[in-house]
Image: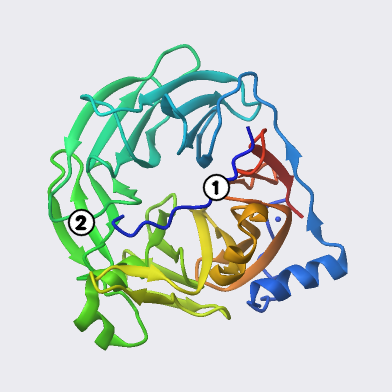
Amino acid sequence: MKNRTLLCFSMSLLTACAGQHQRQEQLLPSKETIEKAVKKGEILTGEMVPVDTALFRYAYRMRVKDSRAVIMDLHNADYYYHVFTYPDFHYVASFGKRGEGPGESNYAANVRFTAPDTVWTLDDGKNRMYQYSGITTNKVPKLEKDIRLDERLLRSLDFDLKDASTIAIPDYSGENRFGWVSLPSGELLRKSEQIPVADPKLLEKNAPAVAQGWNSFVAFSPDKRILAAVTQFGDRLDIYDMHSEKQIEKLGADGEPEFKVTPEGYGIPAGRICYYDVQVTDRYIYAVYDGRLFKDIMKQPDNYQQGGRIVRVFDHKGNLVKSHVLDRPIAGIYADEKAGLLFGLDVNADEQIVKFRLR
């Protein structure tokens, strides 16, 4: 059934893309980017990838390791995660049972591979992380570890692995940008970086609300040298070099996150829905971008299609290399540079895996 549920913004809550010497592009507002691509006839047309069983309600994240893909479905009634063969997407098994019982999840947030047959998953609802093994073509995934995260982590809405024993989680307290957590214990080891809000006084007065307004999606490069963060409610990319501890800030034409602070101290988005997902490869940063104003979305709620139609490709210094404009909005991505393919997740369709050929 086609999913028409509006995104919940609860705050309690190419060939690989381009040659090395391609001229840097200008980071235009989203509307201008789409209009320019339409005028030039440079829209990437997606091809639906059928799967051999009916599973998806809201396919939100795709992670690939070798010949396996795991797709996270936010609204599935039974299981949050589904294993497929890659790149042909034959269904293998499901895991991460939805529920309140031991080892079950009630609000999946993300999934990451740690080995070809092993993943960690994050459950924000229970403030827990789970490790599963057996992500193969002939096994049912098995729950190996269940850890409770440090109570000082107010919310845990995304994560990525710095190494085998440490993860980065965006900090929802507003004290810092990231929390660094021990995987064996769930203990908060330290916090780092400041939220780069234009007006520092906002942090002094309403730090948690600022953190909510600056809700970010994060991803490490394969060599773990850089960490990229993109804001869900603002046109902002930040790149952190883990070795030199330098930060590259890129503010797009649509501006930094806009939000209102409620009397209860929550940050409510007031500007645009911007980034949906980010992936860092050996050479590039791929980020799904929307850019539509909330006020425009609310004028036509029944016609609103969730996701972004723009995939921005940056180099590791934050320079825009290419903006791909798609024929439909997508939420999650996986860029396969070797094959020259981009896979997207279209939560508005019945068949939700879509394949694009990169130019």
Q: CA distance from mark 2 to mark 1?
A: 25 Å
Which residue is depicted at the point 62% across and 66% down? 299
Instruction: Tell me the quadrant of the picture where the C terminus can be found.
Output: bottom right
For the residue marked with disc 1, what is the amino acid? Gly
Residue 19 in view: no
**Snapshot quadrant of residue 198:** bottom left
Query: Camera-side residue: 219 or 328?
Result: 328
Side of 43 relative to 329 (left or right): right
Query: Camera-side residue: 138 or 225?
Result: 138
Q: Residue 268: image x %, image y %?
A: 38, 68
Which residue is depicted at the point 35% across and 81% down? 197
Side of 120 relative to 191 (left or right): right
Query: Camera-side residue: 183 or 337?
Result: 183
Side of 144 relative to 295 (left or right): left
Res 158 label: none
Residue 134 in view: yes
Which residue is depicted at the point 44% across and 53% down? 8
Q: Which residue is mark 2?
A: 154
Q: Residue 58: image x %, image y %?
A: 53, 39
Q: Secondary structure at mark 1?
A: loop
Measured along the vertical axis of the image, is residue 31 above or below residue 324?
A: below
- Crowding near the residue tagged with mark 1, few <14, some 14–19, many ≥20 C-alpha atoms within 10 Å: many
For the residue marked with disc 2, what is the amino acid? Leu
Measured along the vertical axis of the image, is residue 154 above or below residue 20?
A: above
Q: Which residue is mark 1?
A: 332
Q: Residue 116: image x %, image y %?
A: 43, 29
Q: Residue 295: image x %, image y %?
A: 56, 71
